[in-house]
Image (spheres, helix red, strand yellow):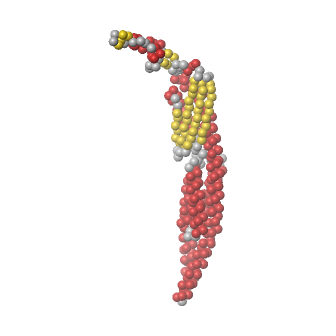
Amino acid sequence: MVRSMTGYGDASATIDGVHYFVEVRSLNNKYFKATIRLADAFQGLEAEFESRLREKISRGTVTLNARCTDTSAQAAHEINAKALARYAEQVKSIRVEGQALNVDLGALLALPGVLQPPANEEDLLARARGAFFPLVEKAIAGLMAMRQREGAVVAEELRGQLDYIAARLGIVRERAPAVIAEYENRLRQRIAALLADAGLRVEPVDIIREIASYAERTDIAEEIQRLSAHVDQFRELLGSSDARPIGRTLDFLAQEMLREANTIASKSPDAGVSRAAVEIKGAIDRIKEQVQNLE
């Protein structure tokens, strides 16, 4: 199955006056890399969030943001009366130029230990886990759907490039036998002209041997066959319904296709074959750029 590595998904819900929001973004990366952004109170959920991401996503830089806004009365911090009283006593005991300082209880609320979180960490994490994880699943589902849509667009573009390569490969396949025949004709004409001037003759077997040597040096039948096979395999992978990522496999295939096209271009002296090989290489380069976006 063809999936892009770029995508976005989000989900939100309000539970008991608390609004929870999760968003997941992904970008291209050769490997899997997760960045989890949570409030300090929810850091204990980071490993679980990353595990969920790894279950669904094989490649890409994935960023997950999870946050909540509590508008209920439960959000209020508890005042530690004993700590506040202790701070007040200390302030009253301080004298400046013989006079005691005025105690501003409101200002003392900001001191460490005066305001206590509304719930202990275990209760807070338990509520957050129950609220966040269904949203994480929903956000990931949205992300994967977007990656599939974008992957389908890329796959269609890749099929167009494969069609182009197949058409140019057909030109090469048709042209290859004619190259040998043309060389044989030129060779015979050249030898005939040279020998006529010198009054000599050459054995036909020598001409045949030279033509055979030339044919062996310029034979591209195997390269044509392998390149055609790579194109067919590429098409099969694009049409596969297998959920496993195929981006790396397609990248490897593109490299092998480029290798065969380079060999064809270097072995054949024919201008028509060389031109078609250059066009094939250009299409393969475009394919290599596109597959870098696939998971």
Location of residue 273 in the rendering, given as x and y in whole percent from the top left corner: 59, 67
The reply to whether residue 217 is visible in this rendering is yes
Q: Residue at x 57, y 79 (%)?
A: 187
In this view, the residue farthest toward the left is 97
Viewer-nearest residue: 243 or 92: 92
Q: Residue at x 60, y 24 (%)?
A: 18
Location of residue 288 in the rendering, given as x and y in whole percent from the top left corner: 56, 53
The quarter of the displayed image where residue 265 is located: bottom right
Location of residue 58 in the rendering, given as x and y in whole percent from the top left corner: 56, 43
Viewer-nearest residue: 98 or 72: 98
Location of residue 189 in the rendering, given as x and y in whole percent from the top left corner: 58, 81
Above/below status of 204 relative to 3: below
Viewer-nearest residue: 131 or 39: 39
Q: Residue at x 53, y 20 (%)?
A: 119
Label tally? 0
The reply to whether residue 243 is visible in this rendering is no
The quarter of the displayed image where residue 126 is located: top right
Q: Residue at x 62, y 63 (%)?
A: 169
Above/below status of 68 relative to 218: above
